Image: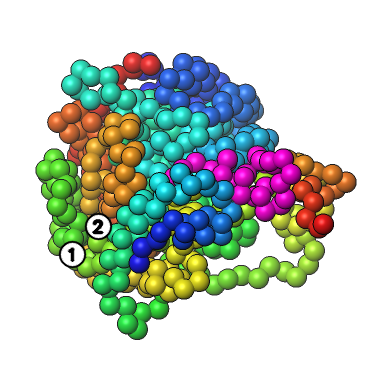
Amino acid sequence: MTNITDLGVKAIRDGVREGTFSAREVTEAFNANVAAGKQLNAFLVETPEHALAAADAADKARAAGEELAPMAGVPIGMKDLFCTEGVATTAASHILEGFTPQYESTVSANLWKAGAGMLGKLNMDQFAMGSSNETSAFGNVISPWRRNDGGNTDLAPGGSSGGSASAVSGRLCPAATGTDTGGSIRQPAAFVGISGIKPTYGRCSRWGVVAFASSLDQAGPMAHDVTDCAIMLQAMAGFDPKDATSLDLPVPDWESALSSDLKGKRVGIPKEYRIDGTPAEINELWDKGAEWLKDAGAEIVEISLPHTKYALPAYYIIAPAEASSNLARYDGVRYGTRELPDGAGLQDMYAATRAEGFGPEVKRRIMIGTYVLSAGFYDAYYTQAQKVRTLIARDFEAAWEHCDVILAPTAPSAAFGLGEKADDPLAMYLNDVFAVPASLAGLPAMSVPGGLDGQGLPLGLQIVGKALDEQSVLNAGLAIEQRAGFTARPDKWW
Amino acid sequence: MSVDSKTVKKIASLARIHMDDAEVEALVPELNNILGWVEQLGEVDVSGVEPMTAVIPNKLRLRDDVINADPLTGGGVRDKVLANAPVAEHGFFGVPKVIE
């Protein structure tokens, strides 16, 4: 039998159901990989007993002849943005150190209900602000991948769901949760050669997810392949009365409806995504992706999304504005750390706590957000950005007259080395150029691995779909997956 | 529009983040770089365009007007609310003296 930790969600679920192996065997194998994978710094908290309890429940249910839950016996990693009852949750920030949630986020509760168990809480960019996982207060996550130049440069796993990316590609867990505000599922998935989908805004409840930019934040799965993503998204999604923006719609059976036959489907290639400075290898992979989808029966059409170049600057007004408001809650009073200098009053305590607790990138975004929302600048920055956001959403609406899904690269580069972009915030922001437009429009979008670049590093292809049409996104992803034949994986060096 | 150190200090104060002069000086060029870049949005003709309020059309729901309609978001969980407070006394959050 192949190594049990090489298996994904579907293989584990089916194997447990069929009795090929027990859920306990699976979980013990992954717990061992987590324990042996500390060099990657992917986990902030390890919870082997949580995973074992879920595994034992699955084995017991099977022994009793009960029908197994949809993810029974599958252990997963949980991004540390999700509040987990009784398990420390920090969003990788010092300001939440010591915080132990008294409640469970809806998405994690849904996963436990579906039979999954938790291997641990995954490292991430602090408050999900970053594209390289270098803003975590608890150290960089290291990608399992290495360049093929024989060097040992530590590479970024992408961000903000960098711990999720590193842990899945390093086989520390078969799948993990991520969250995506402006590409935080898709870009890290692309950097480490795995799949990840951000569903339509409102599919997954935000209740109990530490808020960054509430109009953009959306949870989704990161896993080895498209089918695993479909299974896990089904378990995560669903209406939640506790989230005012949760969509009151049934969760489709995406897994059963998976089909890579794209006859009758039109795939749009947005001409504005051909931007200067994109490496030739990425544009070549994009062309190849279009060929693969054509081979699957789809018609390829050129489309125009005229406001594409304004998406990123609009995002970097809207997201920091929402963040500055959301993060006002960290005041040293209700949870987390408190800094109380001698003789300090309440206002001094707030300022000292926040100075001490937030990392530099978080402070930078709070500052930008505070500025663009301040009296006299609100209309020039924030209102203007929200109007541009309307135009970006209209661009997509107009595009859907000509196509059913859109194909684009996921990121404008392969994984970069840790530290290579850290001193220029703007250069780091530009890594989200292809991911952000779909976020601003609330559309489902997924990254699937397409191939390797000349340095032996994974490159991803992105599919964007109409609102609520995750199925077409998954199906196009599956068509690419079947044709890309992506089997590369990092050598174990840790 | 560009910011100077006086403006950065004011923003820091509005954001309730203590910053020493060195931090302020370091942030001035960083913020100007980012603000200069987002200013390209000014080129876009937005006449007659409404600002985005919801990406997916969705009607705001009202829950039943009863106490504890959802026990998880209802009341009666004081100890849980206080469980993570750095200072909690007599069933309240503790803060430094605010009235002289």
Q: Is residue A132 left or right of residue A275?
A: right
In the image, which disc is placed on residue A60?
none
Q: Identify the secondary structure beneath mark 2.
A: strand
Q: Position of residue A398 (x, y in %)?
A: 26, 72
Q: Identify the secondary structure beneath mark 1.
A: strand
**In the figure, A388 relative to A79: above or below?**
below
Residue at horizontal 16%, vertical 54%?
Answer: A275
Q: Which residues are magenta?
A: A336-361
| Chain bearing mark 2 | A
**The one of A38 and B55 positioned closer to us in this rendering:** A38
The reply to whether dot 2 and dot 1 touch (C-beta < 8 Å) is yes
Residue B14 shows in this picture? yes
Judged from this view, the residue extending furthest toward the bottom is B48
Which amino acid type corresponds to the residue marked 1 in the rendered image?
Ile
| Chain bearing mark 1 | A
Q: Position of residue B93 (x, y in %)?
A: 78, 49
Residue tagged 2? A406
**The one of A168 and A22 positioned closer to us in this rendering:** A168
